[in-house]
Amino acid sequence: MKYKHVIELFNCKLDTKSVNDFCACMQQLVREVGANDELLRFAVLNGLRPDIKNHVTLTMQQPKTWNELVQSARVGEMCVPVVPPPDTNVAVQIELMRDQLNQLSIERRANTVSGQSRIATLRRREWSVSTKIMVNVQMVVGRAH
């Protein structure tokens, strides 16, 4: 039975619990296992969310007592900014804008290719027309002489 509690002790994570609730749960598991204060501190540090753990380890290299750890974790919990849930409406609008940009890009490429072929066609027509004019001019000049 103790083995099961030791596994729980090191697999238990703070997740959505408050620091106070998490620490109380961990103290109960340590009592059931019969572990010492140092093991409790290591297990709690292991189970804290990364943002709270960073606060604890940055403010003190290694908490020396249980109370130091709990106090630092509580402060870390209060310092963590609350991130509002993402606005799905904005995400949808951004996705629509991305699709529109892709469509415009495709149309631009198509117009560039067709524009280049139009220019080539116009040049061929100009060549054809200028050749006909030259032939007509030569014929007229040849008749005049």
Image (cartoon, grey):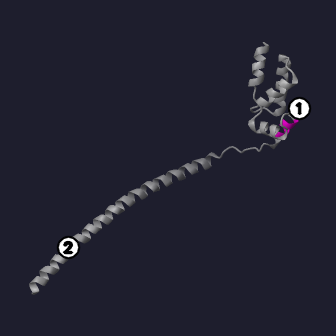
Residue type at numbered disc 2: Thr
* Quadrant in which residue 141 is drawn: bottom left
Is residue 101 rendered magenta in the image? no
Image disc number at residue 129: none
Q: What's the magenta region?
A: 71-76
Q: Nearer the viewer, residue 119 or 99?
A: 119
Q: Which residue has dot 2 on it?
A: 131
* Quadrant in which residue 108 is drawn: bottom left
Is residue 72 rendered magenta in the image? yes
Residue 115 x, y percent position in the rendering? 36, 63
Q: Nearer the viewer, residue 97 or 15?
A: 15
Residue 8 x, y percent position in the rendering? 76, 21
Residue 27 x, y percent position in the rendering? 85, 24
Q: Who's the residue at 76% across and 24% down the image? A: 10
Prevailing secondary structure of the magenta residues = helix
Of the 4 image quadrants, the one containing the N terminus is top right
Relative to 58, residue 5 above or below:
above
Residue type at numbered disc 1: Lys
| Left or right placement of residue 72 versus residue 97 in this view | right
Q: Who's the residue at 19% across and 77% down the image? A: 133
| Left or right placement of residue 9 versus residue 117 in this view | right
C-alpha separation, residue under disc 2 versus residue under disc 1: 97 Å
Image disc number at residue 64: 1
User: Could you tell me which secondary element the residue under label 1 belongs to?
Assistant: loop
User: Could you tell me which secondary element the residue under label 2 belongs to?
Assistant: helix
